[in-house]
Structures are given as C-alpha cells and as structure tokens.
Image (spheres, grey):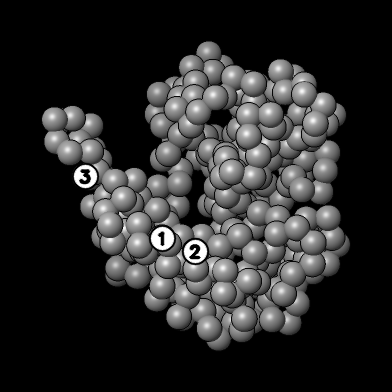
C-alpha cells in the first residue's frame, strides 16, 4: 500500500510539473487558483487554466506509522480518510463494527498537529464517534449518503450527519446507485430506477437536518470504480452534474444556496481549515 501510494503521488506531481493540473496545498494557492478561473470565466479568450487538485487519501493504510505524517504532508497530502472497506491499519471501515486502533488514535493526534482534514467517510459507526471524540480539527464526509433514505451501515444516520454539521463540516452526496435508492441491485441492468432527482433527495435531507444549505455538497465518487451501469440514468458525463442546478431550482433553492451546494461549501471548509496556517 505504501509503495502504490508513493507511485500515485509521483503521478500527480508529474501532472503538476507538466501543467496538466495544479496541485493546491495552502490558502494562498487556493485563492489564487479560484481567482484565475474567475478571470478566465469573464474573459474566455485567455488560455483556460488547468484544473486544481487537492490530494486526499482514502484509507490511511499507506502511512506505515503515524509519525511519518509530516513527510506525507510535505508531499502534498491534505485530507485523510482513515478507513475504507473492512478492517484497516488505523480503523474499522465499512461492513465492520471495529473502532480505532491504537495507531488510529496516534494518527488523529498527528493529523491535528499538522492541520490535516479528517474525512469520516467509510468509518464504522464506532470508529466515527471515537474519531469525533479524539480529533479537534476540521471534518468532512467526502462521499456519503443518508441512512434514513437507504438503510445500510455505509451511509450515515441522522445523528452522525448532525454531528458533522455541528462541527461545521460538509457532506458530499455519492452517485453510486446502490447508495442512492434502496433495493437497487448490481448487475440487474435497472439503473433507470435511479436519477439525479434521487441524488438531490440526499442533498435535501442534509439541508433539512441543518436547517440551511451550508453543509450539503457534491461528492460524486465518480472515480472509475464503476461506469454508467451503476450511475444515475440521466448522468452520461461529468458535465451532466450541471443538471443538479435545474433540479435544485425547481425544488425552491435560491441561486446562492445552489452555489453553496455546487462548490461554495467545499471552498469555505478549505479556506477555514487552511486559514490556521496563514495567521487567519
């Protein structure tokens, strides 16, 4: 795991060096990147800027020891989800009832010291609550849906979502069909049962629990683990995420609230987290 992750890091840095992407590591770089894109949107005769990337780790198993975290941060890592599926080096993940390991507690201490963001996605219920008790930094759920709508341990229940809201965190909706509507079966070729409207049901549930639109966002999880056969039927390419704007508008969301859901909440969380390191 350590070796594979090092190779992935090298690939991201090669993309950055070639100008294909921009790796973003701090508040100054983030704000500069947003300003560059804003200027391009007002004058598209300019050269389009590269997309920005923030390096996150899903399952911290590649980190062999918690005290190695400073080297990972130096390499650009900014967000860590300690677990994925099953038991891990640092915590129990999806489909387990395992909590944090001793190394997991040490990892959270190191993350707090280095101001890394904690991704609660995939943590078991026990590990979730332990993590909140032992970590005082910024938290998010990068790709997570609502257990109230799709009963499964992979989703978060209302108490967990409210706990993230209380920490000013953000929950990004996932676009994996089985997580969107109950009863969807892999391989059944019935993805017409699932649409972006059903994704918005999860976004709206988070907004209702919060009483505002400040904590719901797009997580997607459209990273190559599955294709159209397991995605909402009206989503063909990444550009179709813009259809969410029309759906949210029809449900009565204001332009400002839609902007928060589409990008603003993630941006605010990152700016708040990284302002610690810039004297803000």
The disc label shown at residue 253, or none = none
For label 1, the residue is 12
Mark 1 and mark 2 in contact (Cβ < 8 Å)? yes
Of residues 120 and 21, the one drawn nearer to the viewer in this rendering: 21
Sooner in the amino-acid sequence: mark 2 or mark 3: 2
What x and y, as percent, mark residue 139? 56, 58
Regarding residue 275, the answer to whether it shows in the image is no
Q: Secondary structure at mark 3?
A: helix
Residue 18, x across and y down, in percent: 28, 57
Q: Quadrant of the C terminus?
A: bottom left
Q: Nearer the viewer, residue 135 or 41?
A: 41
Side of 198 where 262 appears, left or right: left
Residue found 48% across the figure and 17% down from its top? 246
Q: Residues under labels 3 and 1: Cα distance?
A: 21 Å
Q: State the separation of the CA atoms marked 2 and 1.
A: 6 Å
Query: Residue at left 64%, top 26%?
Result: 232
State which quadrant residue 104 falls in: bottom right
Describe the element under mark 2 as helix, strand or loop: helix
Q: Residues within 10 Å of mark 1 (few under 14, many from 20)?
A: some
Determine the CA span between mark 2 and mark 3: 27 Å
Residue 38: give x, y in percent of width and height: 23, 38
User: On the picture, is 161 further left or further right than 278?
Assistant: right
Q: Residue at x 51, y 79 (%)?
A: 69
Q: Which mark is residue 36?
A: 3
Q: Which mark is residue 8?
A: 2
For residue 17, above or below residue 221 = below
Please tell me in which quadrant of the rendered image residue 185 appears: top right
For marks 2 and 3, give the one nearer the viewer.
2
């Amino acid at each position: 795991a350590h070796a594979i992750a090092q190779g992935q890091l090298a690939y991201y840095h090669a993309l950055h060096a070639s100008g294909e992407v921009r790796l973003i590591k701090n508040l100054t770089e983030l704000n500069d990147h947003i300003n560059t894109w804003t200027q391009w949107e007002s004058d598209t005769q300019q050269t389009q800027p590269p997309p920005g990337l923030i390096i996150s780790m899903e399952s911290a198993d590649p980190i062999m020891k918690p005290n190695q975290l400073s080297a990972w941060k130096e390499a650009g890592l900014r967000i860590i989800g300690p677990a994925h599926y099953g038991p891990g080096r640092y915590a129990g993940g999806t489909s387990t009832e395992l909590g944090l390991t001793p190394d997991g507690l040490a990892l959270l201490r190191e993350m707090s010291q280095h101001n890394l963001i904690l991704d609660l996605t995939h943590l078991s219920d026990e590990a979730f609550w332990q993590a909140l008790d032992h970590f005082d930094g910024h938290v998010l759920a990068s790709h997570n849906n609502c257990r109230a709508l799709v009963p499964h341990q992979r989703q978060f229940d209302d108490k967990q979502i409210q706990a993230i809201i209380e920490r000013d965190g953000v929950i990004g909706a996932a676009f994996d069909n089985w997580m969107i509507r109950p009863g969807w079966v892999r391989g059944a070729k019935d993805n017409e049962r699932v649409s972006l409207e059903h994704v918005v049901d999860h976004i709206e549930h988070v907004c209702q629990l919060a009483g505002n639109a400040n904590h719901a966002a797009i997580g997607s999880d459209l990273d190559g683990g599955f294709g159209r056969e397991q995605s909402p039927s009206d989503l063909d390419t990444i550009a179709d995420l813009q259809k969410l704007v029309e759906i949210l508008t029809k449900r009565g969301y204001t332009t400002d609230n839609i902007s928060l859901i589409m990008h603003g909440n993630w941006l605010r969380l990152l700016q708040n987290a990284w302002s610690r390191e810039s004297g803000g």
